[in-house]
Image (cartoon, rainbow, N blue to C red):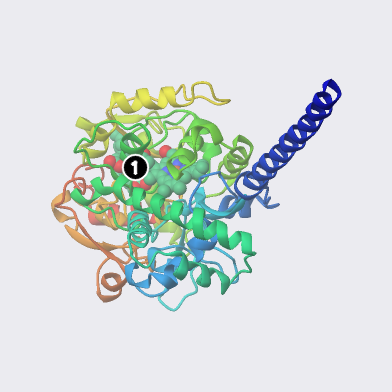
Amino acid sequence: MAVFMTLLNSKVGQIMTTLILIILLIAGGVGYFAWYNFRREVPIVYKSAEDHFKYGSINSGGIPFFIWEVLPDLFAEHLPGPGGYQSLGFIWEEGKEMPIGVSKSIVGFPRQGSTCALCHSTTYRKSPKDTPTLVLGAPTQKFDSIANIRFLAACGNDAKFTPDNIIPAIEANHQLSWSDKLLYRYVIIPQTQKALMGLGLGFAWTNSRPDPGPGRIPSFNPVKFINFRLPLDDTIDNVDDPPVWNQRKHKGFDYHWDGLETNLTETTIMGALAAGTKPDNVPLENLQRVEDFIRLIPPPDYPFDIDPVLASQGKPIFDNNCASCHAFGGDRTGTVIPIEEIGTDDHRIEMWTQAAVDGYLAVGDGEEWDFTHVQKQNGYVAVALDGIWLRAPYLHNGSVPYLRDLLEVPSDRPSTFYRGYDVYNPNQVGFISQGREAQQEGFAYDTNLEGNSNQGHLYGTNLSTEEKQALLEYLKTL
Ligand code: HEC
Ligand code: HEC
């Protein structure tokens, strides 16, 4: 009997051990399968700093690459026009897999993300027939970030967003294994749909405020309301995308339109968080490469003729009227000018609250990086004017289409115009903002809407016509 029990015990023991082994193997297999398909990272490294700026991942999340690729075909009716993503203002270089400002990374499966170049690069044309010239580091003229978000949300909310529609569309471009297909059908597509619907809800507050249109974004309210979950307020934060070139010469400046940061590395990380990077996933090395790059990008030369005599007549006018706030080395250049003094639209300042400052000061706690230079100020930075010709429309809210208009009193500045057309007007110094083409390709900007005011900044408005002409010529040389 005892012998029988031992035999039984050892038999039971063997079976148990085998069972445990099988369970462990299955668990390990499932774990490996999950890791391989969702977490395995395959770095995509761009050798050139330029390509890294355009396409290099900043871990900004985004949506599955293969799904992102097929949305414009499947949901063309939700785009503002024909031409796929280009109708939202993406710049697509010939023969490239994705537009500038979009990254592809592999974390388990290929994922799409945003890069800094999305809002910080542009094209311009000297005439409608010209091939567009690309300038990295420039404020985007055409990319419409809110229209992009609304397009993605509309796709997610569309009854056609189903595996039966999406998988065959993906398979027209890529081979999917049977296990890939199962993953897309039962996990990736449903989760993406949920995320896109969530994106729409997260940005619903933009529906009750004026649209920013191309070249502008709501700057920090998305982070306040979505990331920090601060209570909704009714502030309006639509701002013009700024340039990021020539940063080595901006050392010591206050950053962002209202000077809420004073450190470039922190400003760069802020850019990544705004693009969707999670605080515990900030790719410091990749961002350092971007920072090194934007330090060195030169501001672009004015592409039309400049009259050297007239420009030299403009220099003393600039020195007397503008240099203290705008020349490199000027007493107030790169510092905040109080709102009572500058008199431009104050909505952007009202948006930036102490609660937002506190949120940023806390968000890096426990990480390898931290924000320690975030602050609340009460005015706008007197920016250096390097490459000013390509920064039209002017002021923090992009409310003045031409540089020539900025030298006129506000009542003589255009009260409505179109922005988003990339053909340049060398006479007025800015992008063409009136007429049929500008209307067809552009977005109607109304300075009477909240946050869009073109008041303030009266410097130079009392100069004579000849002096203004000379000053304008000089400004083209900066
Ligand atoms: C979705 C558009 C968008 C993306 C993506 C983006 N930025 Fe920006 N960036 C802006 C806007 C808009 C501002 C101005 C915000 C404000 O002050 O209200 C800004 C401000 C800046 C500034 C301050 C410029 C100055 O002179 O004050 C720097 C530097 C900068 N961004 C770098 C980056 C970097 C680096 C990345 C990528 C890691 C990035 N940005 C991603 C839109 C963007
Ligand atoms: C007292 C300081 C001060 C003086 C003097 C001054 N500015 Fe400005 N300037 C500013 C500030 C501050 C801003 C940003 C205001 C805003 O965006 O609301 C600005 C913005 C600008 C912009 C728009 C920049 C952009 O990227 O959109 C231009 C162009 C400009 N100034 C040109 C001039 C010229 C030309 C003169 C001389 C005739 C001049 N400024 C005199 C403080 C000054």
> Which residue is at 69% across, 44% downward?
29
For residue 221, what is the image quadrant? top left
18, 307: nearer the viewer: 18
> Which residue is at 34% across, 42% downward?
219
Question: How many numbered tags mark residues here?
Answer: 1
409 vs 333, left or right, is left
| Most distant residue in the bottom direction | 129
| Most distant residue in the right direction | 3
65 vs 326, left or right, is right
Q: Is mark 1 within 8 Å of ligand 1?
A: yes
136, 221: nearer the viewer: 221
Up-down relation of residue 34 to residue 402 (above or below): above
The quadrant of the picture showing ligand 2 is top left
Where in the figure is residue 463, as x and y percent of width and height? 23, 48
Say which amino acid is labelled 1: Ser
Residue 449, can we see it? yes
> Which residue is at 42% across, 34% downward?
255
439, 129: nearer the viewer: 439
Where in the figure is residue 97, as x and y percent of width and height? 59, 65
> Which residue is at 44% across, 26% downward?
363
Q: Mark 1 points at which residue?
A: 219
Q: Quadrant of the N terminus?
A: top right
Residue 475, can we see it? no
51, 198: nearer the viewer: 198
Where in the figure is residue 72, as x and y percent of width and height? 43, 69
Where in the figure is residue 241, as x and y percent of width and height? 38, 49
